[in-house]
Image (cartoon, helix red, strand yellow):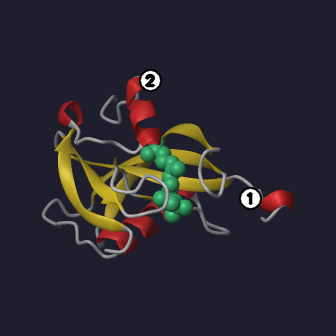
Amino acid sequence: LNMPNGIVAPRVVVVVCLLKGKKVLLGRRRSSIGDSKFSLPSGHLEFGESFEECAARELKEETDLDIKNIELLTVTNHVFLEEAKPCQYVAIVTRAVLADEDQEPQNMEPNMCDGWDWYEWDNLPKPLFWPLEKAVQAGFNPFRP
Ligand code: GPP
């Protein structure tokens, strides 16, 4: 994926809006991109995976939660030109619900996230990771039927 001049090919990430009642799961990022900003769980699509498999795997790895009813919502494109290492992500945005309503998220990768919590869509924490902020500004709402 490395191309001349240190440019890296666009990567596919699967983003999960995990809905619980009126709330959605967000965590504060620990990352070179969007450090300390709130975002949805996400991760890179691995070779051979379906979007749904990727969503379920990432949620398990990052939160230990099991999810079901995984649905595709939209696709967004994010170009980071101002970063030390310019990069581009195509985000496959999905939604899902808990397989077991009583399961609570665990912070399985504390070097990548400060912790997970549930937030109402109308009262999201600040600051949001800018790709999410942009989607919200554009009217994206994972609760719409
Ligand atoms: C980074 O994913 C995710 C994006 C740039 C897109 C997010 C889009 C939304 C609509 C929220 P990552 O944190 O899993 O990747 P990396 O580990 O490369 O930082």
Residue 41 badge? none
Point out the tag, 1 or 2, that comes first from the N-terminus: 1
Q: In which quarter of the image is residue 47?
A: bottom right
Query: What residue is shown at x 59% (from left), y 62% (from top)?
Result: 45
- Is 71 or 91 nearer to us in this picture? 91
Residue tagged 1 = 8
* CB atoms of marks 1 and 2 within 8 Å: no
Which three-letter amino acid code belongs to the residue tagged 1? Answer: Val
Q: In which quarter of the image is residue 127?
A: top left
Rendered position, 119 above or below 117: above
Residue 4 image point, x, y percent:
87, 60
Left or right of residue 104, residue 112 in this image: right
Query: What residue is shown at x 54% (from left), y 47% (from top)?
Result: 92
- Is 113 or 122 nearer to us in this picture? 113
Q: Quadrant of residue 109?
A: bottom left
Query: What residue is shown at x 39% (from left), y 25% (from top)?
Result: 137
The residue carrying mark 2 has its beta carbon less than 8 Å from ligand 1:
no
Residue 53 image point, x, y percent:
51, 64
Rendered position, 131 above or below 122: below
Which three-letter amino acid code belongs to the residue tagged 2? Answer: Ala
Residue 88 in view? yes
The residue carrying mark 1 has its beta carbon less than 8 Å from ligand 1:
no
- Label 2 neighbourhood size at 10 Å, few (<14), some (14-19), many (20+)? few
Residue tagged 2 = 138
Q: How far apart are marks 1 and 2 (CA)?
A: 27 Å
Query: What residue is shown at x 59% (from left), y 51% (from top)?
Result: 83
Quadrant position of the N terminus in the picture = bottom right
